[in-house]
Amino acid sequence: MTEKPADSDMPHILLVDDDRDLRESVADYLSGHGFRVTAAAHAGEARSLLRTALYDLALLDVMMPGEDGLSLCRHLADKGDMPVIMLTARGEATDRIIGLEIGADDYVTKPFDPRELVARIRTVLRRVERAGRYAQEERIAGFSFDGWVLDTVKRSLTDPEGVLVPLSSAEYKMLEVFIRHPRQVLNRDQLLDMVQGREAHLFDRAVDNQVSRLRKKIEADSRDPKLIQTVRGGGYMLAANVTAMGEAG
Amino acid sequence: MSEAQSEKRRLRLWPRSLTGQICAAVAIALLAAQLFNAVLLYRGQKVQREVQVVNALGVRIVTTTERLNEARERRAERMRRRGFNEEEIAAENEQFPRFRRRGFRRGITLENNPPDIAQMELQPTLTARLSDLLDGYDIAHAKLAVYFDDRPRLPPADAVAPPILSDTGRVMAVLQRPDGQWLATRVPAPPSVWRITGWLIVQTLLLYGVLLAAIILVARRITRPLAALTGGVRDFTETQRHEPLAPSGPEDVADLTQAFNRMSRRIGAMLDEKDVMLGAIGHDLRTPLAALRVRVESVDDQKLRSRMVASIDDLNRSLEDMLALARIGHDVQPPQPVNIAALLDTIADEFTDLGKEVDLVEVSRLVAPVHVTWMRRAIRNLVSNAVRYGERARIFLHLDNKQVVIRIDDDGPGIPEEELPHIFDAFYRLEKSRNTASGGTGLGLTLARAIAEQHQGSLTLANRMNEASAVQGLSATLTFPTS
């Protein structure tokens, strides 16, 4: 049995990046925000660190000399229950999708706002804590409701005719919250709480405003909403049956 | 107008394909050669025909004259032996100018009077030739003429056979002997020159058939690999990838195919190298930028910190634009049907959230296949320009003749009219010299146009004028097809 360190109440992050400057700065920042960080310069070092200690989450750079981050991520996903957030330098959507398909839980594009990185780490940790890494939920590739499809890998929404409806990231997150809680009344505080974990700057944004934007995109008539209904005195509710869809292939 | 029409007609007549052009060229050359050939043949045939006729006539005249003279000589001898004197012999000859029936040859007459030559055509060339021939055989003649008689020959009254169909007329030689008697002989005229022409036409057609078959065979051996090559080049232009083509056809064309394979392999390798390099550049620049961005958080002065964050964001955007511009065009993923109105909505909201004035003025639900990340970038760049230089942006979306038209108006100073045609050039120069210090917009506009072109569309910029023709702002119009 590997012995857990004394300050085990702090989440332990394994950071793997070949750039020393990035390793040091991110480690410093995360240490200042309630995390314990162990850094590795390459996949080999990470593998040997993994043999001697347990980590709560791995932050992996995609592009590294030798074995790259995607390969290491696949190794971690095959091996066990450690959640992974990829650090990617390419803005390509395909890279992100590959990362998520091989088992990463999230990705952050360089350069990133460190507060957002912290928020994402917390979200992933919270989700793992709540559901367990290999809970059914994690194998879901998307949801369908009333003919609409929300692809959680590509983070895209398509309408019943198969037409892509672009969403802002805030809209996507709010829709995902609704979909994960179908036919439940969610009040503004609950919505804010569930959405803000991912996106820091939603704090000061009116939930009502966000809901009305979302309605404009998915409702046939946004003045007479059928899908996202207003519950008097309560909040909002997704009035549709949601079906979870497995991973493609 | 008429010039254009004649141009069209000329183009229609002249085939466009290689096979067609070779065939047409060979056909024209062959026609010219055959015409030349026909002229030569016609001339040769004419001389040969004359010689033939003259010889036939000459042989008859010579043999007839010789036999006649011999026969008369023998008769004169007999008469002399029986005691007739010379005068009586001459009178006898005059009285009986004809041969006896046995000695007669078909088509030869000997008369005391000139034969009827009415409606006959005098042939001076033939006359001269025949005269030369007879002089060579020492056949004396007082008068000589050759006529052509094209009247149909009357069949003999007792003839059972039908009249000869291939009657080509007769040639008649009329000769007055030194003793004053008229010798006339006729031979059938040789087949007319038209028969030769007919044969020439048949021959030409045969040649055409054989030659064209050969040409089409060879041309197809050339054009088939050429067509494959064209397809390969087209594929390569569109996707920068293609399967190596199997070299076929004549050696020259096969060499070309192989050269193309080598070239495309090399270009493909260079493009791959470029992608790897761009990825490395992106990674190697963004990673320190990310480290810097994290370190900025430890700066206590909030004003200074936000300025540093803005600088890093600017740098990152420029970097992204540069990488995107280098990468555009070889997107492996096909375009996807996208609700364009929702896309514009999302972009407008982004800017509104940042406190910018962006209005969707006229937007209808409209679906078109686009590369959504690219299209978002293009529109974002245009809106960003509008709010930066024109204070506010108004977005219009409509469908015009199967084209999606996205117009973004601002209320800024516009662009000086004389610079408007050069605006993209200027940015291209800017981009080439990597001089992005003068503002990120240069690349943004270039990129927006490249994205429009990636979607088979266009991007145009124009100043908006009021009635007094004062500039009210700039209009950027992005157009691309719905399918």
Image (cartoon, coloured by chain):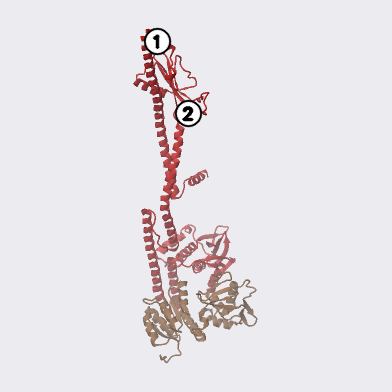
Chain colours: A brown, B red
Where is residue B171? Give x, y as percent: 45, 24
- The residue tagged 2 is B168
Q: Amino acid at mark 2?
A: Thr
Q: Are circles 1 and 2 on residues that touch, CB within 8 Å?
A: no
Chain of the residue under label 1: B
The residue closer to the viewer here, A26 or B8, is B8
Is B428 located above or below residue B30 in the figure? below
Q: At x 47% / y 74%, what residue is drawn? A: A97
Q: How many residues crowd around disc 2 within 10 Å: few (fewer than 14), some, or many (20 or more)?
A: some
Q: Quadrant of the C terminus of chain B?
A: bottom right
Chain of the residue under label 2: B
Where is residue B13? Give x, y as percent: 48, 45
Left or right for B236, reference A191? left
The residue closer to the viewer here, B73 or B194, is B73
- The residue tagged 1 is B90
The residue closer to the viewer here, B417 or B458, is B458
Q: Which mark is residue A154?
A: none
Whether residue B193 is visible: yes
Where is residue B274? Give x, y as percent: 39, 67
Q: Amino acid at mark 1?
A: Ala
Q: How many residues crowd around disc 1 within 10 Å: few (fewer than 14), some, or many (20 or more)?
A: some
Is A9 located above or below residue B40 in the figure? below
Is A133 located above or below residue B178 in the figure? below
Whether residue B303 is visible: no
> Looking at the rendering, which quadrant does residue B396 occupy?
bottom right
The residue closer to the viewer here, B127 or B298, is B127
| Label 1 residue SS | helix
| Label 2 residue SS | loop
- Marks 1/2: CA distance? 40 Å
Where is residue B435? Give x, y as percent: 40, 65
First-in-chain label (1 vs 2): 1
